[in-house]
Image (tube, helix red, strand yellow):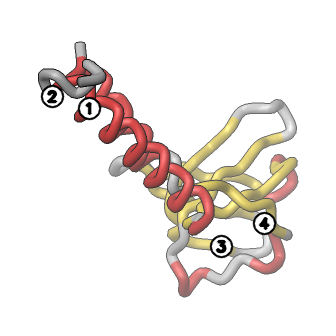
């Protein structure tokens, strides 16, 4: 059980360090090859790394598949961004969990004397 909790907290640690920040579609620079999430007008979401952009469409690549999104179909654009504060909070929380697990494993740690 303790190993499972450790693995879960470890996976949360690496997923929580990134967040998506909303940006204007016209500020996207193709040179950066950033990861984007597009929410279309029909509320479907498309994620991927930017491959191509012109006045009418944007092409993304995700897991080997390319997807074309027309600019007129886009409702919101978000760019994947590393979050230092989230990373620090998650590391602190994971350290606390590891400390709690370590004290519960050591025999006699909870016996007052």
Say few, some or many: other residues with alpha carbon within 10 Å of mark 3 (under 14 / 14 to 19 / 20 or more). some
Q: Is residue 83 left or right of residue 70?
A: left
- Decide which of 14, 70 is in the foreground and name it: 14
Residue designated by label 4? 56
Callout in the foreground (1, 3): 1
Gap in angstroms between the C-alphas marked 4 and 3: 8 Å
Q: Which mark, by number, is residue 52?
A: none
Q: Which residue is mark 1?
A: 103
Q: Tag 2, which secondary structure?
A: loop
Residue 107 x, y percent position in the rendering = 12, 22
Q: Give the residue number, with chain letter if any, for mark 2.
A: 106
Image location of residue 112, percent across then percent down: 30, 22
Query: Which tag is nearer the camera, tag 4 or tag 1?
Result: 1
Element type at marker 3? strand
Q: Residue at x 52, y 47 (%)?
A: 16
Nearer to me, 109 or 15: 109
């Amino acid at each position: 059980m303790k190993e499972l909790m450790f693995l879960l907290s470890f996976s949360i640690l690496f997923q929580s360090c990134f967040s998506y920040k909303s940006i204007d579609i016209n500020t996207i620079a193709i040179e950066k090859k950033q990861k984007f999430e597009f929410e279309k007008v029909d509320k479907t979401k498309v994620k991927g790394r930017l491959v191509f952009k012109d006045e009418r469409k944007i092409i993304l690549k995700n897991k080997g598949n390319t997807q074309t999104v027309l600019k007129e179909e886009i409702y919101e654009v978000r760019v994947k961004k590393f979050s230092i504060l989230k990373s620090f909070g998650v590391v602190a929380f994971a350290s606390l969990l590891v400390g709690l697990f370590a004290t519960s494993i050591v025999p006699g740690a909870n016996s007052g004397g």
